[in-house]
Amino acid sequence: MTFVTETLAWLTDGDSWVGPNGIPARLLEHVEVSILVLLIAVAIALPAGLFIGHTRRATSLAVGLANVGRAIPTFAMMGILLPFTQAYDPALGFTLYPTVLAMIILALPPILVNTYAGVTEVDRDIVEAARGMGFRGGQILRDIEIPLALPVIVGGIRSAAVQVIATTTLGAILAGGGLGRFIIDGIAQNDDGMLYGGVVLVAGLAMLSELLLSRIQRVAQPSGRGRLPRRPFLQLAELPPREAGI
Amino acid sequence: MSAPARHASGATVDFEHVSKQYDAHAKGTPGAVNDLSFHVPAGRICVLVGPSGCGKTTSLKMVNRLIEPTAGRILIDGVDTAGRDVTELRRGIGYVIQQVGLFPHQTIAQNVATVPRLLGWPAARQRERAEELLALVGLDPGRYRNRYPRQLSGGERQRVGVARALAADPPIMLMDEPFGAVDPIVRERLQNEFLRLQEDLAKTILFVTHDIDEAIKMGDLVAVMQLGGKLEQFAPPAEILANPASEFVARFVGADRGLKRLSLSRVSELDLRPAVIARVGDASAEARRRSATDPFPYLLLVDESRRPIGWIADAAIPSEGRLDERLAHSMSPLINRRTTLKDALSMLLDADVQAGIVVDRTGAVLGLVTADMIAERMRETAGDARFAAVDLETIERAGAIGAIEGAAQPSEPAPT
């Protein structure tokens, strides 16, 4: 059990908390990259999912793409992207970019599928009642479909966030910082304290984001439908069984 | 900001050769409609009734253009709906659907104020209007305004649905099985309340149901539709029951249509038979003499305020002394002038003495009603009996009286 004491020692060592390679700096990098990736993924997947859900167009294409995206392991994705980013600009090879790109691609499916599924699962009778009363298409989306689908949409972002935070760790392998730096460096320097300290920090950050987003998800619940049933802590897949089975 | 909806007492609705055809191979399409023409006067309830797949809901949805006709025109107050802006058209038409379609994430007050909100009314006026309408449909605004739909019972939700459709005071309401999702007791209450509301509102209402009894009860006019979206008969309910225009209509209204007609007439339409009455404490001999001159073999004993106590058979009236309550040996059902002939007859069938006692609001006797009088009234109002034989025939074919329910469907192969 020496690694426990070593980990504690590393975590409590004042030197671990200062400088450009200190925990606060690395944590900040990690969070920055994760948020950047999430924002970009949301900016792409959310409108796409809303469009597909509202219009019912291109549904099978979207679900198919999303599943392909989900089937490729992140590390493989980084490997696939590396030559492309290098071809685009050799300087971009061993930097954070392949990681960021790979993570965006991996964050898209849960957000896209949940958004689309959330919108399509809104009761058709309600939507037709709205149309019959003179809602325009955009008003139906804004006033009816999005509010009712919001918990499912936030659920998708929640899954994506946890994946992204975990995956940002891999960014350290190619280049860049983040909490993964401690794990890579810990292995390289045979420093178990640093290695497991990094692990603890990544896991803690993932759990924290999970907690935060599940709280947001509960707030997003339309008041009329009651509280969400309590979900298992750290639930990774937020997908409806139908889509998950494809 | 749009102008407040004009206080409308209904608009006319005309269907002119309206058809809706669907691709024969398409699955799950609603019923087609074939050359539908009729005129609904302003302020009347027109019920579209027929078996599932007869196109009644399709017809309804063509009015607010949720479905566009493939041929023909629908006119509201003489103006072709096809030429109007679809959103503006819909905001001027109240719409109630079977599952009510309340927005689960909005409060009851927000739900009711939906169309005023779309029309851009000031918030205060929206709130005011929502409260006014909740009160109108019998829901205490203070209690219900901030609740959510899932906290309401089925009947309460239906009321909110009606309130929401009335919010912008539209001249026309479309109601698709609005009372379909509640139990029969609540449904009856909602129907009665709605009819009372309509007396004041005088909206033009198109109402869809598959239930012929509801159609007869709610409709000023009833459109009976046949599979394939063909209009079989368009007439007031009494006319449809008395003179079904086709064998289909006769079958659809059912072999008991005579009984259904009874539910359209009320005791007040009858000339009541005067009752021979005597008060408690009257001289027996005199009462006996009076009762003997009347063919009805019973004397009705009443109290000081002419409220009935019970019957005394002529033979049981003592020849001397005073009448007393203990002489009354049986009682008939008490009926008021608003009772339908159907209910009156039903009560009579259960009574010992075959005469219903009609009383006024204070419970005082007005007169008597007998089964013969009801039958006579039905004979007077019956039209020609072109399709009278149909029922007998179907009953014979079905083999048993007990199969009358099933006899509503033809047992021979459907005409091609």
Image (cartoon, coloured by chain):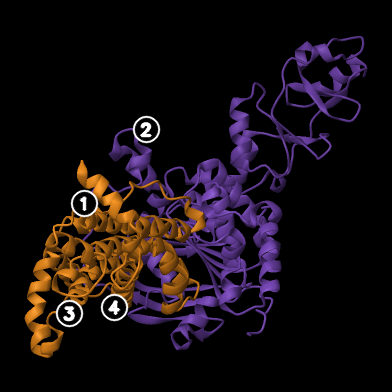
Could you give the CA–CA distance between mark 3 and mark 1, rounded to whole angstroms? 78 Å
Where residue B150 appears, x then y in whole percent?
Answer: 51, 51
Front: mark 4 or 3: 3
Chain containing the residue with disc 3 = A
Left or right side of B74 for A100: left
The image position of residue A211, as x and y in percent, is: 39, 55
Q: Quadrant of the C terminus of chain B?
A: bottom left
Between B222 and A205, the one lying in front of the other is A205
Give the residue at x 69% y 76%: B7
User: What is chain A's hue in the picture?
Assistant: orange
Q: Does residue A239 appear in this view?
A: no
Amino acid type, label 3: Thr
Image quadrant in which you'd find residue A202: bottom left
Residue A86, relative to residue A8: is it above or below? below
- Chain B colour in the picture: purple
Q: CA distance from mark 1 to mark 2?
A: 22 Å
The amino acid type of the residue labelled 1 equals: Pro
Left or right: A114, with B246 as reference point: left
- Horizontal and vertical percent for residue B76? 53, 80
Q: Which amino acid, mark 2?
A: Gly
Q: From the viewer's perspective, is B75 left or right of A193?
A: right
Q: Which residue is disc 1 drawn over?
A: B413
Find disc 2 in the rendering and name its residue. B402
- Label 1 or label 2, whichever comes before in sequence order: 2
> How far apart are the alpha carbons under marks 4 and 2?
65 Å
User: Which is nearer the N-term, disc 4 or disc 3?
Assistant: 4
Residue B53, placed above or below residue A33: above
- Residue named by callout 3: A95
Query: Mark 4: which secondary structure?
Result: helix
Q: Say what amino acid the circle numbered 4 marks.
A: Ile
